[in-house]
Image (spheres, rainbow, N blue to C red):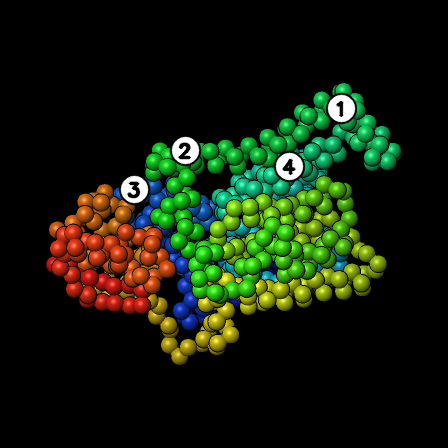
């Protein structure tokens, strides 16, 4: 039994509906991931703000996720990131179902494994409904490795060019995937050797020996290797260079898209190791070392072991499947932040590339199915184990909503960001503008109906206003000391005290929440 394209589309539509229902349930229960709110606010700035729109469009990172989310703006700024992540995850589901049709492994078992992971694996569900860039990462990871295996089968540079495009999209989804270039270095040489082998009937070792010890063949090997490197690496590296140049031209810093809290959610959103250790939360943190972490990611995704056990192919194909482990080890060299779901979920995704393109039946069909089902079941358990031990604050919040039965409240939960947005909407006017810094308050701005009567960093008069705010604005939004983003904004409790002392600023608290204070300064 094989799946027709119509059936795959129907199943994809069912998955869309399933994810939409889950997203609605979690949103109603008050789960709003900060990365989703960051994208929503940047989209809002792009369409609602008349100043520095090129700066917003050209420096917001990750660029791939941001541009995809813009396509879903007609559904609303807040919903666009969720719609984007759902569509990307369903696209991954669609490609996987198409690919298992051509696998040598038992079709029904593979089909069941794909359904179980996409419908029930918590990391897959979280990637779809959180609005994060995880969906873009896993989709382009799969498409990249899928294109490489198509190239191995057909030896046409078309697929290698596609792989280059997907590698660029992956790097612009998460900059650390630039280290994949180092991971790919060894097997490109082996692929080049494969293309120039002679004496096809001889043992492989002898073929390689002849290729390396013949002057003409060595020249062909060098030319072929350099050509493959150019095709695979030139586009993503050139794109990074141009993007750095754009940031230098418009923001004065080539790494602005990586280091600025106004451009990159990871600057303020990812939990630093120092913060996690201070709070003493999460047991996964002690596994983030070069040796332990790759093993731990495999431990959480035993279906990768199933793919290795059923593997059939050349050495360079095996090295291709192992590349993510090399990448993870390299990315841990200078790590300062906790690695979240996206670094774990790519392992089962890569496993399916191996299962679809480079696996065969071992022992017999029954035992092969048992190996696949065991790997799938243990991978599902590994997903639940990861979330039970996670050290990321927002992933912990996601888990608590499920384990503490908070998903079906009697009434919709109104978040702190929404409460503040409603209050600011009620008080701001042309005569009473509000000074707000979206470095930390992007979640609040994302909930506002419009950007009228706000003074923000993108506006040219922001620096002038912040020097003496009482001359230009009526209200100031201040981040309290316990706010996790307190140190990333100029509008924090410490600077408020400095302004009060330096300017003899008279301020009255007019509204206060757990993390924010609204002051009236006139």
Specify which label sits upstream in the sequence, 4 or 1: 4
| Residue underneath mark 4 | 185
Residue 405 versus residue 391: which sits nearer the camera?
391
Q: Which residue lies furthest to the top in this view?
A: 215
Dot 3 surroundings within 10 Å: few (below 14), some, or many (20 or more)? some
Q: Residue 52 carries which label?
A: 3
Specify which label sits upstream in the sequence, 3 or 2: 3
- Which residue: 48% across, 51% down? 336
Q: Nearer the viewer, mark 3 or mark 4?
A: 4
Query: Residue 381, can we see it?
Result: yes
Q: In which quarter of the image is residue 316?
A: top right
- Mark 3 and 2 residues: CB-CB less than 8 Å, in contact? no
- Mark 4 and 1 residues: CB-CB less than 8 Å, in contact? no
- Which residue: 48% across, 53% down? 337
Dot 4 surroundings within 10 Å: few (below 14), some, or many (20 or more)? few
Provide the secondary structure element on which disc 2 rests: helix
- Mark 1 and 3 residues: CB-CB less than 8 Å, in contact? no
Mark 3 → mark 2, Cα distance in angstroms: 17 Å
Q: Residue 217 carries which label?
A: 1
Q: Residue furthest bottom?
A: 410
Residue 140: give x, y in percent of width and height. 56, 47
Mark 1 → mark 2, Cα distance in angstroms: 40 Å
- Which residue: 72% across, 35% down? 190
Residue 210: give x, y in percent of width and height. 82, 27
Q: Residue 245 carries which label?
A: 2
Image quarter hosting the N terminus: bottom right
Residue 506 as seen in the image, left or right of residue 30: left
Specify which label sits upstream in the sequence, 1 or 3: 3
- Mark 4 and 2 residues: CB-CB less than 8 Å, in contact? no
Q: Nearer the viewer, mark 3 or mark 2?
A: 2
Mark 4 → mark 1, Cα distance in angstroms: 20 Å
> Compared to 140, does 219 lie above or below?
above
């Amino acid at each position: 039994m094989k799946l027709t394209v119509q059936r795959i589309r129907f199943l994809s539509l069912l998955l869309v509906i399933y994810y939409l229902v889950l997203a609605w349930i979690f949103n109603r229960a008050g789960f709003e991931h900060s990365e989703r709110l960051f994208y929503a606010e940047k989209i809002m700035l792009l369409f609602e703000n008349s100043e520095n729109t090129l700066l917003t469009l050209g420096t917001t990172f990750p660029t791939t996720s941001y541009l995809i989310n813009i396509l879903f703006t007609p559904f609303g700024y807040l919903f666009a990131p969720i719609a984007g992540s759902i569509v990307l995850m369903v696209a991954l589901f669609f490609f996987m179902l198409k690919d298992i049709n051509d696998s040598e492994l038992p079709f029904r078992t593979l089909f069941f494994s794909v359904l179980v992971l996409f419908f029930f694996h918590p990391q897959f569900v979280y990637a779809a409904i959180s609005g994060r860039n995880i969906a873009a990462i896993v989709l382009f990871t799969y498409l990249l490795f899928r294109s490489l295996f198509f190239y191995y089968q057909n030896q046409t540079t078309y697929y290698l060019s596609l792989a280059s495009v997907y590698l660029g999209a992956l790097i612009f989804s998460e900059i650390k995937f630039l280290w994949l270039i180092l991971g790919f270095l060894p097997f490109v040489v082996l692929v080049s050797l494969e293309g120039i082998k002679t004496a096809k009937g001889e043992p492989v070792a002898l073929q390689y020996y002849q290729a390396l010890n013949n002057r003409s063949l060595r020249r062909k090997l060098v030319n072929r290797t350099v050509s493959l490197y150019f095709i695979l690496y030139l586009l993503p590296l050139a794109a990074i260079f141009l993007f750095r140049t754009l940031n230098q031209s418009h923001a004065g810093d080539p790494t602005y898209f990586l280091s600025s809290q106004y451009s990159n959610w990871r600057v303020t959103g990812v939990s630093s190791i120092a913060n996690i250790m201070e709070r003493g939360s999460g047991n996964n943190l002690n596994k983030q070392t070069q040796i332990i972490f790759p093993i731990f990611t495999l431990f959480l995704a035993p279906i990768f072991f199933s793919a290795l056990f059923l593997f059939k192919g050349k050495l360079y194909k095996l090295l291709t499947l192992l590349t993510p482990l090399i990448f993870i080890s390299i990315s841990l060299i200078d790590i300062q932040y906790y690695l979240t779901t996206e670094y774990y979920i790519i392992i089962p995704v890569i496993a399916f590339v191996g299962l679809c393109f480079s696996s065969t039946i071992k022992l017999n069909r029954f035992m092969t199915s048992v190996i696949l089902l065991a790997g799938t079941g243990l991978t599902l358990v590994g997903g639940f184990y990861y979330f039970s031990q996670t050290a990321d604050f927002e992933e912990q919040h996601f888990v608590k909503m499920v384990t503490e039965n908070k998903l079906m409240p009697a009434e919709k939960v109104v978040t702190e960001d929404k409460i503040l947005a409603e209050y600011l909407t009620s008080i701001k006017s042309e005569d009473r503008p509000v000074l707000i810094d979206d470095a930390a308050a992007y979640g609040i701005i994302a909930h506002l109906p419009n950007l009228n009567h706000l003074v923000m960093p993108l506006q040219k008069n922001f620096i002038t206003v912040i020097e003496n705010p009482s001359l230009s604005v009526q209200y100031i939004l201040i981040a309290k000391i316990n706010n996790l983003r307190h140190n990333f904004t100029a509008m924090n409790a410490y600077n408020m005290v400095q302004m009060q002392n330096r300017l003899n600023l008279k301020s009255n608290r007019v509204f206060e929440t757990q993390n924010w204070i609204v002051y009236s300064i006139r």
